[in-house]
Image (cartoon, rainbow, N blue to C red):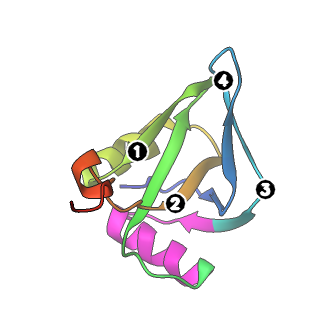
Amino acid sequence: MVSSKKRIAICRYRGVFDKREDGLMSYSGGEAYVVDLVDNMQLSGFKQEIAKTIDSTVDGMLVKYFLPRNNKILITVLKEKDFARMVNIYKDCEHMEVFIMKEAPPAKTLAEKQPPR
């Protein structure tokens, strides 16, 4: 749930993550969009707003973010409790940055990759 303070999410989409030798990650390229975080917003509504903004669907959409001052660990938002936690972590900020990705299909096992004999 979002508090009554006006806040926005800067949604980064279609870029790439780069990891430095020291483990810090940076995001480059892609596009950035702003989505308002409104009172009582939940993850499903947040994803719907993002989908409308980027002209996409919520199918396979992943929302990820970095903890403040920690660009080594990318946190994935999967359920309402995760979304509430993310919003709470950034409760004193006017904006937060989130990364929007499409879920990758499951990786094939080695047996599935090899042609039949």
Mark 2 closeness class: few <14, some 14–19, many ≥20 residues within 10 Å: some
Q: Distance between the residues labelled 3 and 1?
A: 20 Å
Residue denoted by label 1: 76
Q: Quick one: SS at disc 3?
A: loop
Residue type at mark 3: give it: Gly
Residue type at mark 4: give it: Leu
Which image quarter holds the N terminus? bottom left
Residue denoted by label 2: 101
Q: Where is residue 45 in the image (x, y as percent from the top left)?
A: 38, 72
Q: How far apart are marks 1 and 4 (CA)?
A: 17 Å
Q: What residue occupies the far top of the structure in this picture?
A: 22
Residue denoted by label 4: 24
56 relative to 24, above or below: below
Residue type at mark 1: give it: Thr
Q: Residue 29 carries which label?
A: 3
Q: What residue occupies the far front of the structure in this picture?
A: 117
Residue at horizontal 27 percent and vertical 54 percent from the top: 80
Q: Quick one: SS at disc 2?
A: strand
Any magenta on residue 25?
A: no
Q: Which mark is residue 88?
A: none
Residue at horizontal 69 percent and vertical 67 percent from the top: 33
Of the image marks 3 and 4, the number of the one nearer the N terminus = 4
Mark 4 closeness class: few <14, some 14–19, many ≥20 residues within 10 Å: few
Q: What stretch is highlighted in magenta?
A: 35-53
Q: Residue 55: name its quadrant.
A: bottom right
Asked whether disc 2 touches disc 3, contact meaning CB atoms under 8 Å apart, the reply is no
Q: Which of 49/13 is in front?
A: 13
Of the image marks 2 and 1, the number of the one nearer the N terminus = 1
